[in-house]
Amino acid sequence: MKFIWILGPQAVGKMTVGQELAKRTNMKLFHNHMTIDLVTQIFDYHSKEGKHLIKLFRQSIFEEAAKSDLEGLIFTYVLAYNLQSDLDYVQKVTTFFESNNIEVYFVELEATVEERLTRNRTPNRLEHKPSKRDLQWSDQDLLKSTEKYRLNSIEGDFKHKNYLKINNTNLSASEVAEKITIHFFI
């Protein structure tokens, strides 16, 4: 089994690239909103209960995937490089998979804010992420988080051997998935 992180800021195309990569590799896509949108139907995302349940569901899925005969799992995540708790979470999950003899890969996507605002409104995104359908709120959240957090790495942040960073501002999800497949799996 393989575990692939697709990292990057909101609306950079993580889920869409993951969908394309899943088609090419026979791996399963587990995008971060699958747990967020489930839990936030009951608890606020920022509540103690909401955060606990999101982490609990994710970890349970990771544990079952690690024991399964899945070819691989693709997971999307917005990583704030200036938040130690985010860095710790990524390390914890990576360590879990590696300790289970599962190869871990990192793909980081980056795109301009203007392109991300455009992608924030795509039908595919809105279909799969109900919490993003309030477009005024979603656009503002994207802009605020861009100001508050460092959502892309800088030189030296990643030391993992299986790491690829792609600026996908002018690339389709299919083109990005092809680059990932060639880089890691061919």
Image (cartoon, rainbow, N blue to C red):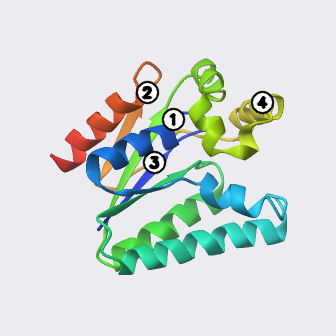
Q: Can residue 154 be seen in this view?
A: no
Q: Looking at the rendering, which quadrant does residue 41 occupy?
A: bottom right
Q: In this view, does 171 lie above or below 97?
A: above
Measuring 43% from the left and 67% from the top, which residue is drawn there? 94
Residue bearing mark 4: 135
Find out whether the residues at labels 3 and 2 contact each other: C-beta distance under 8 Å.
no
* SS category of the residue bearing label 4: helix
Residue type at mark 1 is Gly
Find out whether the residues at labels 2 and 4 contact each other: C-beta distance under 8 Å.
no
Indicate which disc, 2 or 4, sits on the residue closer to the N terminus: 4
Q: How far apart are marks 2 and 4 (CA)?
A: 22 Å
* SS category of the residue bearing label 1: loop
Return the mark for residue 168. 2
Residue 43 falls left or right of residue 17 = right
Residue 64 falls left or right of residue 186 = right
Residue bearing mark 1: 13
Residue type at mark 3 is Ile
Indicate which disc, 1 or 2, sits on the residue closer to the N terminus: 1
Residue type at mark 4 is Leu
Indicate which disc, 4 or 3, sits on the residue closer to the N terminus: 3
Q: How far apart are marks 4 and 3 (CA)?
A: 23 Å
* SS category of the residue bearing label 3: strand
